[in-house]
Structure formats: structure tokens, C-alpha cells
Amino acid sequence: MLSNKKIEQLIHLPDLQFVRYCEETYCVNRGIYNIIDAWFYDQNMINVSSRRKIIIAFFSYLNKDTQKIKFGPGGVKAHLENFWNFKKDSQIESA
């Protein structure tokens, strides 16, 4: 699990370095990263820093047992929707 300090450092990297971090750490290619980034943007995550934080949280959520995250056909969207619902449920429970 990443510390808050490490996350703060990561989210402020230049775009290319942040994408490379995601590629190296979570083994997702740039195309998958772009789909994920655009999906969160479409969910009104307009602020880049907030979106990068949730992208890291998404990858961490998926990356529990394995280093490489694999998506099958339509898998990215399904995983994003599951994660989004999980986050909403977690916020409701903690309210």
C-alpha cells in the first residue's frame, strides 16, 4: 500500500512519467490507461490530481493478488463500474 506522501508525489509527475509509472507498476499499456483516465473523466472526475488518485486506487483495488492486471473483452469497463460502485458503497457506509 502506498503512503499518502508517495501518492502526492506520483500525482504531480508529468503526464508521461505518470503513465510510465502505471505501466511499470501495474503492467497496463498506455491504451488501457487512456481508457481508464477517460472513463473517470466521464464520471465528472475533472480535476487531474483527483483523477490520478482514483486511478491509483483503482489499480490497487484490482492488484490484490497479482502484479499484472489482465482485462478480457469488455473487462475494463466492468472492472471500472464494479470499483465505482464499491467506492460509492464505502462512502455511504462511512457517512
Image (tube, grey):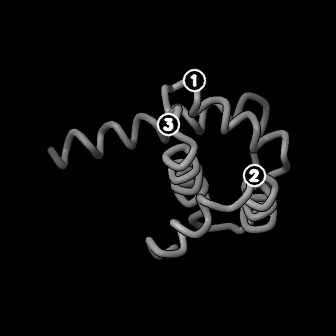
Q: Which residue is mark 3?
A: 82
**Gap in Å between the C-alphas at discs 3 and 1?**
16 Å
Question: Toward which corner of the image does residue 64 lie, by quadrant?
Answer: bottom right
- Where, quadrant-wise, is the C terminus in this rendering? top left
Question: Toward which corner of the image does residue 87 lie, by quadrant?
Answer: top left
Mark 2 lies on a secondary structure that is helix
Q: Disc 3 residue type?
A: Asn
* Residue for point 49% across, 46% down: 50
Q: Disc 1 residue type?
A: Asp
Comparing marks 1 and 2, which lies closer to the viewer? 2
* Residue for point 53% across, 49% down: 49
* Residue for point 79% across, 31% down: 73
Mark 1 lies on a secondary structure that is helix
**Gap in Å between the C-alphas at discs 1 and 2?**
19 Å
Asked if residue 83 is positioned above or below residue 63 in the image, the reply reads above
In the displayed structure image, the side of residue 94 where residue 3 appears, left or right: right
Q: Residues within 10 Å of mark 1 (few under 14, many from 20)?
A: few
In the displayed structure image, the side of residue 3 where residue 24 appears, left or right: right
State the residue lying farthest toward the left. 95
Q: What is the x, y in percent for residue 69?
A: 72, 55
Q: What is the x, y in percent for residue 60?
A: 56, 60
Pick the residue in front: 73 or 33: 33
Q: Reading the chain from its start, which is encountered first: label 1 or label 2?
A: 2
Q: Disc 2 residue type?
A: Asp
| Disc assigned to residue 15 | 2
In the displayed structure image, the side of residue 74 where residue 42 appears, left or right: left
Q: What is the x, y in percent for residue 5?
A: 47, 75
Mark 3 lies on a secondary structure that is helix
Asked if residue 44 is positioned above or below residue 17 in the image, the reply reads above
**Gap in Å between the C-alphas at discs 3 and 2?**
26 Å
Q: What is the x, y in percent for residue 20?
A: 81, 60
Q: Which residue is mark 1?
A: 42
